[in-house]
Structures are given as C-alpha cells and as structure tokens.
Image (cartoon, rainbow, N blue to C red):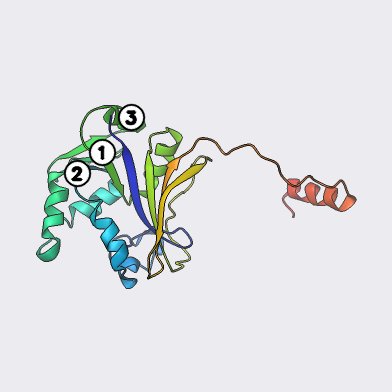
Amino acid sequence: MRKIVGTVFVSLDGVMQAPGGVNEDSTGGFAHGGWQFKFPDPAADATLGATFDGYDLLLGRRTYDIFAAYWPYVEGEEAQLGETFTNAGKYVLTRGDQPLEWENSHRLKGMDDVAALKQGGGPDLMIWGSSEIYPGLLSAGLLDRLTVMIYPLILGDGKRLFGDGTPAGALKMVDHQVTPSGTIIATYEPAGPIPDGGSVPPIATAREAERQRRMQEGTW
C-alpha cells in the first residue's frame, strides 16, 4: 500500500497561495506571489532536498497546470529536479476532461480513485500545493502525513491550507524543528477525532443567559 504525504509552505496566518513565483497564482487578486523566496532559508531548503526523489505526485488540477507549464522546460540548476518531476507518475485529481499532456500523467476523478491508487503498489504519493484536495483527503481518511513549513510572515489574504469542508480532527506531531531563520517545520499524522475533555463549566447568571440568547439570534 502506498502512503499519501503532503508538504506545504504557509505563512503564519495559514496562507499557502503562490509561494514560488509572482505569476504562479494571482486568482482572487492575490498580490504576494513568490513570497517564499523573499525569506531564503538554507536549513529549510536542506529539509526539502530529501523530499523530491522516490515519490509519485498527487496534485490538484491547478497545481498540475503550474507544474506542467514550468518543470518540463526549466534549465540550469533546476533541470535535474524538472527531470525528476517529469519521470515521476503524476496523478491529477480533477473533475474536468482537459488533456494531461505532460509525460506520465494520469487522471483521477474523485476520492474513490485516490483510495484505489493508494491500495496499489508503487512509490508513495507526494502532494505539492493543491490546497483544495486536502478537505476531501482528510474526510476520506486517506492522508498519512503532512509536513507544514511555516514562514515568519503574515500575508493577510489568499488561499488557506485548510479551507471550507475540512473536517474536525486531531493531529499527532511526529517531528519538528525551528530553523535559525525562524521557519517552523512540523510534521503531523492524523490522530482520529478530537478527544473528549472537560471545559470551563458555565455559570448560570442573567448576564450569561442574555449572552447566550444574543448568540442564538446572531446579534452578539
């Protein structure tokens, strides 16, 4: 059985949109494309270097489009990584029927297809970008591990790692480090539902009753 693992770059306020380039993804009027490269971090780069080889890719359609328009054509120092991505199997989760012309690309229509792929043999599946596929993967219990690289900046707006439809659940930290430049690299594995636990007991006062009433009305 394959594992499905994700690596994401996010700001302190959880934005993961367009870390790699100015024109990578400006949807929604996002104006901070390429933000990751404004915070160079050799220690984070060293961690990333160990994640590229030996994986197939699991991508959302937009991230696939970004990769397919760049990595097959890149030259210079990044050419070897471009060849690695080209040679890897690329599994694209998409509801559309647009051509997937980059070599070794395969279409997945939904989470049932992802589950069947996971049950088969082959390299583990690495997710890059692809924020919109995480809610479905978590709901279906298909995500095995997630590494979040949190950079020391606030972007204010943009696509978040966990968007609408993400189910509630607990995570277990299995590795972490803080680089000298201030990047937090934390790796998590799903750990089931949120545990039951105690809470501060309410105090039955008229003010609390009024506050509860206003919350229910939407006027609080």
Mark nearest the camera among 1 and 3 is 1
Evaluate if marks 1 and 3 touch, with contact meaning CB atoms under 8 Å apart.
no
Residue 137 position within the rendered picture, expressed as x and y whole percent measured from the top left = 39, 38
Q: What residue type is labelled 3?
A: Ala
Quadrant, the N terminus: top left
Mark nearest the camera among 3 and 2 is 2
Residue shown at 37%/70% (left/top)?
181
Q: Quick one: label 2, few (<14), some, or many (20+) residues within 10 Å?
A: some
**Tag 2's secondary structure?**
loop
Q: Which amino acid does label 2 sit on?
A: Gly
The numbered mark, 1 or 3, whose residue comes first in the sequence reads 3
Place residue 95 in its image quadrant: top left
Total residue callouts: 3
Q: What residue type is labelled 1?
A: Asp
Q: Mark 3 highlights which residue?
A: 115
Residue shown at 66%/39% (left/top)?
197
**Tag 3's secondary structure?**
helix
Q: In the orientation shown, which residue stands out farthest toward the bottom?
A: 38
Place residue 135 in its image quadrant: top left
The numbered mark, 2 or 1, whose residue comes first in the sequence reads 2
The numbered mark, 3 or 2, whose residue comes first in the sequence reads 2
Residue 74 position within the rendered picture, expressed as x and y whole percent measured from the top left = 13, 60
- Left or right, 24 with respect to 72, comes to right
Q: Mark 1 highlights which residue?
A: 124
Label 3 to label 2, Cα distance in Å?
20 Å
Label 2 to label 1, Cα distance in Å?
8 Å
Q: Residue 54 carries which label?
A: 2
Evaluate if marks 2 and 1 touch, with contact meaning CB atoms under 8 Å apart.
yes
Quadrant, the C terminus: bottom right
